[in-house]
Image (cartoon, rainbow, N blue to C red):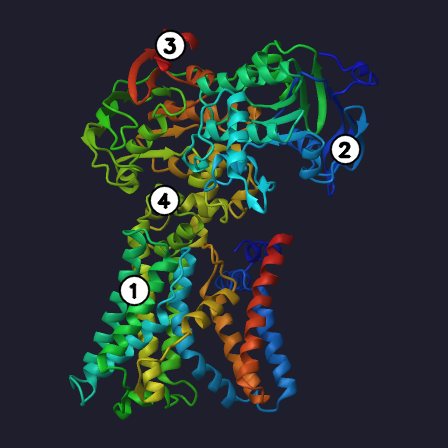
Amino acid sequence: MSLDPSHTQTPHLGLSVSGLCKSYGPVQVLADASFEVRPGEVVALLGENGAGKSTVSNIIAGSTKSDAGSITWRAKPYSPASPAAAIDAGVGMIHQELKLLPDLSVAENVYVGRLLMRGGRIDRAAMNAQASAQLKRLGLEVSPERKVRTLRIAAQQQVEIAKALTLNAELLIFDEPTAALGSEETELLFKQIRKLKAEGMSFIYISHRLDEIAEIADRVVVMRDGRIVARHERADIPVRTVVEQMVGRSVERMFPPLSEPGSKMLLEVENLSSPERSFQNVSFSVRAGEILGIAGLIGAGRTELVRAIAGADPISSGSVRVAGKPVHLNGPAAAIKAGVVLVPEDRKAQGVVLDQTIGENLAIGNFDHVAPNGWVFPKAVQKFAEAGISRLGVKGRPNQAISKLSGGNQQKVIIAKWISRPPKVFILDEPTRGIDVGARAAIYDVIADLARSGMAVVVVSSDLEEVLGLSHRVLVLSRGRQRGILDRSEASNVAVMELATS
Amino acid sequence: MAVSNGASELKAGPGAQAAAGAKLSALFAGTMGPLIGLVLLCLALSLTTDTFLTVRNILNVLDQVTVLGIMAIGMTLVILIGGIDLSVGSVLALAAMVMGFVAHPDYLNLGMPAGIVTALVVAGLCGLVSGLLVTVTKLPPFIATLAMMSVARGLANMITDGSQIIGFPDWFTSLSIIRHFGFLSVTVGLMIVLAIIFAIFLNYRATGRSLYAIGGSAEVARLSGIPVNSLTNWVYAVCGVLAGLAGIVLAARLDSVQPSSGFGYELDTIAAVVIGGASLSGGVGSIGGTAIGVLIIGVLRNGLNLLGVSPFIQQVVIGVVIALAVATDTWRRRAQ
């Protein structure tokens, strides 16, 4: 770790950022940020949500203006007024939420806004040929005439990269590029980055997946609270060191100790299959007080499996028993009644009603409890909400809009919504996705507590370390098939990945 | 919602008065803007005309908005769950024609009660079909109710082959004429009672609160165990019944029914709900707000008439008011 200013002064053809500041009203989101990206280099930008990574990238990509500071790009002063200006200067950004037009073709997306013309008409042949050439450069065989909607997320991302390449980008900013990718797809992306790097392109790489950084980055810049707190000249730094710099305190333990499971079988799943074959013949059981992790690559059928168990999606065959009683899975309401609750994968779209208050969000799904005769009184909602808030340590009040809470606190509200019933089977799908590293530990504690209080807990996560650290046993899915259930003692990174890629 | 909660929290005075204030503000949640608009409108008309602020005229306004008001209650529910119902004007006409056909001596002559009940059932069925098109066939509400708008209008015309039915019993027409206790006709009273019932339903019944959840996010509501599809069907059915009821009220006011009545009413109704602060994307809105929206449209029409403004200019003014009301609401939200 070095904070000496050796990174400045030497003029080169890369990007040099110095003293950038940005405030929104009284809140300073970026303070004196300085770093550089040399040609042919991948610089990883790390930090919790709100650390200022996005602000600094948006300034470089031209979608935000800085209040102070300067940028030099290819030895010239650079202050793009708009994303278009940045693109003209050779700086492109691949956003986490891809900005593609799903109903247009691959080629049209690559050339959107500057469609190739010939004699007043769109020159589709040329567009298709050139888009296809760029995709080939990325090692991708996709018809340029295919509609983007029909492509997988990973392929859509490749289209965005191809678009940047046809714009002659020399610097690409990636914001969480692998959040939606499986490991094979991530490997492909890395291969492409290495290839383009060798051609002299530079990259700023933002990611929450610290294990990837060592693999892809040349140097690491760590941000916290709008400031750069560390610069590493190499990327193979211990994860713990980086996490400590990101959260600004030492991370003593990430995962809480697990208690011994009881003996009572609470959840028994037998030969469960989905109509779309996203999972087939899955069988497992979870005892009271036990945490079962479900691991697998993206698309392995993990989310589909737990959604079916929670009644959210239909099944084609198989059975589910809760505490020995068969459950007729014809909707979430039936599952909830039987004691199976789900904290869904996509918090904003499936977990909370963003327009409503914390109290209202807690009351949804608990009207049988909050309003025994169907009458909902604000006082009862308030009381119910306060109980849930204090039980899980949510930082908020019942009357507060839930949209104002951090991801971690929103997640706690979703867990609190169910906890009072109390459920028998608690399923959490990607419980820490998009949640700050520092706030994750609190969610882990909550999950361990759920098990300790005697519930059967099922945790789905793409974060392997999370699955391994939290679970008594780990079920591994691959392409919809159950590849095995590993005991905590035998579940290691390698063992799980072997099964997941089989 | 959030605004009024914040306000009542700031007051935070002890005692029953503050609590009552909070409850009242809950009923008119998020409707401060439209309410101020209505008050300003009334003030302006009181100053510019000497006839506006008379008991007689105010009662006139209430009489004139009953049809719109009853339909707007149903539309509020539909818009709250993120839907829209374009068929209410046609369903109003169909219900009125069914009532006339069943009750009138020239046709089936089964008596008014049978006519009214049949009309309401038919209107409810129309709404239910719209609901099923949305929940089962997965049509967008705009398309489903656009189809119903056409079908219901056609059926209304088919009943008498396009001709009107005139003349109902005196007791029926007097429902909208005789002012009991000196001020309240039965139809106006009906509108007020319905508004109160639905306001209480939306604010204090679990099912009513569930509608807000569905409008906020149907998927969150479904995963929380709320029966989204069946509630959606119910909401469209209730909206249909209320449109039918509005048709009956209109029949009482005109002493006749015609298949062309209610043409374009769906747009007035949507306008009233939206002026009242409801969001077309769902999850935001209230009966209190809708009541204000209905009154703004009613007062505006009445006032412009008193001022002798031509009906053509009235249309322009109402259009401008819709745009202004929604724009200020959008600005206010963005400012928060």
Q: Name the residue under label 3.
A: A498
Same-chain check, marks 4 and 3: yes
Q: Mark 2 points at which residue?
A: A21
Circle 1: is it few (<14), some (14-19), or many (20+) Cα within 10 Å?
A: many
Q: Nearer the viewer, residue B15 or A343?
A: A343
Q: Name the residue under label 4.
A: A365
Q: Find numbered disc 3 in the image and state the secondary structure of the residue it sits on.
A: helix
Q: Name the residue under label 1.
A: B127
Q: Which chain carries label 4?
A: A
**Residue A218 in the image: x percent, y percent?**
65, 13
Any part of residue A373 in sight: no
Q: Residue at x 23, y 82 (%)?
A: B160
Q: What residue type is labelled 2?
A: Cys
Same-chain check, marks 2 and 3: yes
Gap in angstroms between the C-alphas marked 1 and 4:
27 Å
Gap in angstroms between the C-alphas marked 4 and 3:
40 Å
Q: Mark 2 lies on which chain?
A: A
Q: Which amino acid does label 1 sit on?
A: Gly
Any part of residue B152 in sight: yes
Gap in angstroms between the C-alphas marked 3 and 1:
56 Å
Question: Is B109 placed left or right of A80 in the picture?
Answer: left
Same-chain check, marks 2 and 1: no
